[in-house]
Amino acid sequence: MSDRPPKLKLLILLLTLVVLAAAVILIAPQMPRLRDFDQTFYPAARYTLAGENPYTAEYIETDQGAPPDFFSPAWLLPILLPFGLLPPEIARTVWVLFLVAVTSATLLQMQAWGFRGLRPLLLILLPWALITLLFGQVTPLVLLGTIWALNLVHRGGGSRTAPTVQLVLAFLLIGIKPQLGIFIAVPLLLEMLWWRDRRLIGLAVVGGLLLVGTLLITPPWLISKAAAVQEITAPLWKSTLERELTLWGWPLWLAQPVRLLVVLVMARWAWVQKSTSPAWWAGWLTAVLIITPYTRAYDGILLLPILGLMAMHHRWQLALFVLFMVLYIQLPIGELGSVVAPLTAWLLFVPWRGLRRGMLPAPLAAEWP
């Protein structure tokens, strides 16, 4: 296509856009409702465009047992606003296509992880990605920000002189979901501090300003309300250690030793390697789903890196994972979105790498280029 005249390229682009627009219009009436997009994100965009504060606006009660209020940081709003300009059916369809594009772009960025060609895009078909799309959730943006930030911080994505503004944007995406982003950002920031990365100054300044700005437009009771909402059990979709222990009738205090073990093993692995690696980060993103105090099934898209590495290097691990999950969901309390999924993947992939030196297979032992 590089040899074609500019006018022909423009014509092809225009035709592609026309075909895509026609497809969206045809598909829109058949598109099922995206629970979180329809109930929270789209109304938040509409309220903002109308000049109202989306944090204090009134949202319709849902069937999840919790009000669908807008709790996301303010910097998510610029991403949502263009969708608020569209009719609901069209916005819903375009949003799904947008999330698919974001997830695809993320997987295509993972060259340092050994992801080659277009085959990694098949990971989008896994249930933990499809659940995210069906809810219209924003977790794909968190994953995109994570991979983008890792590529900027490590040499696989350029150098440590990459523009600070790109790193700031990547961390903003990570921070869209604070209950996940804090656990992703901390080890990455510590690594930057270890390497004396000067871009930390820019991150601290811009991050502080945005945090203050967000607090200024949010009501003082929002954090306490968010904490209260987290206490409400949403049947089938809440995915935490505490909920799983409750379902099995086991004491809740067991959740804390599990979290501590996961963190210690990951820390030991990083110490043995004297750094992090793509395999370590795949394990850590999975660990985040285990240690976070609040997550739901749609956050399982963070499993794609570890499942992708399994598919490339150890298909027997992936086969065991699938077999265990198939057996687990046959139980009365079994759910694909349960914390059992990340815990199983983590146990299959991580512990012996985190506890013993020299046991990391060659394809996974490589550092960032």
Image (tube, rainbow, N blue to C red):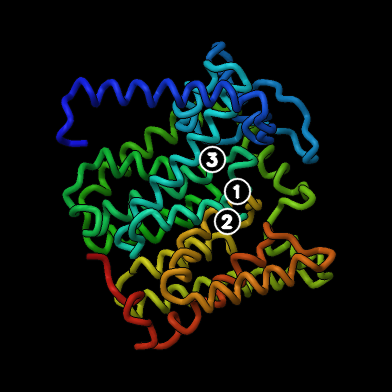
Residue 46, horizontal then vertical, whole percent: 58, 18
Badge number at residue 40:
none
Instruction: Name the N-terminal-most of marks 3 and 2.
Output: 2
Q: Residue at x 56, y 70 (%)?
A: 345
The answer to whether the residue labelled 3 contacts the one labelled 1, judged by CB atoms less than 8 Å apart, is no
Q: Is residue 193 above or below residue 28?
A: below
Residue depth check, mark 3 versus mark 1: number of the one nearer the observer: 1
Q: Position of residue 62 (x, y in %)?
A: 77, 33
The residue carrying pointer 3 sits among few (fewer than 14), some (14 to 19) or many (20 or more) residues within 10 Å by Cα, namely: many
- Quadrant occupied by the C terminus: bottom left
Secondary structure beneath dot 2 equals: loop
Observer-nearest of 186 and 1: 1
Residue that carries the numbered disc 1 in the rendered image: 130
Secondary structure at badge 1 equals helix
Q: Secondary structure at mark 3?
A: loop
Gap in angstroms between the C-alphas marked 2 and 1:
6 Å
Q: What type is the residue that disc 3 sits on? A: Val
- Judged from this view, the residue extending furthest toward the top is 50
Q: Is residue 66 left or right of residue 305?
A: right
Residue that numbered label 2 is attached to: 126
Across and down, in percent, residue 147 comes to 37, 53
Q: Which mark is residue 138?
A: 3
Q: Position of residue 235 (x, y in %)?
A: 79, 50
Q: Residue at x 27, y 71 (%)?
A: 367
How much space separates mark 3 and mark 1, taking CA atoms? Answer: 13 Å
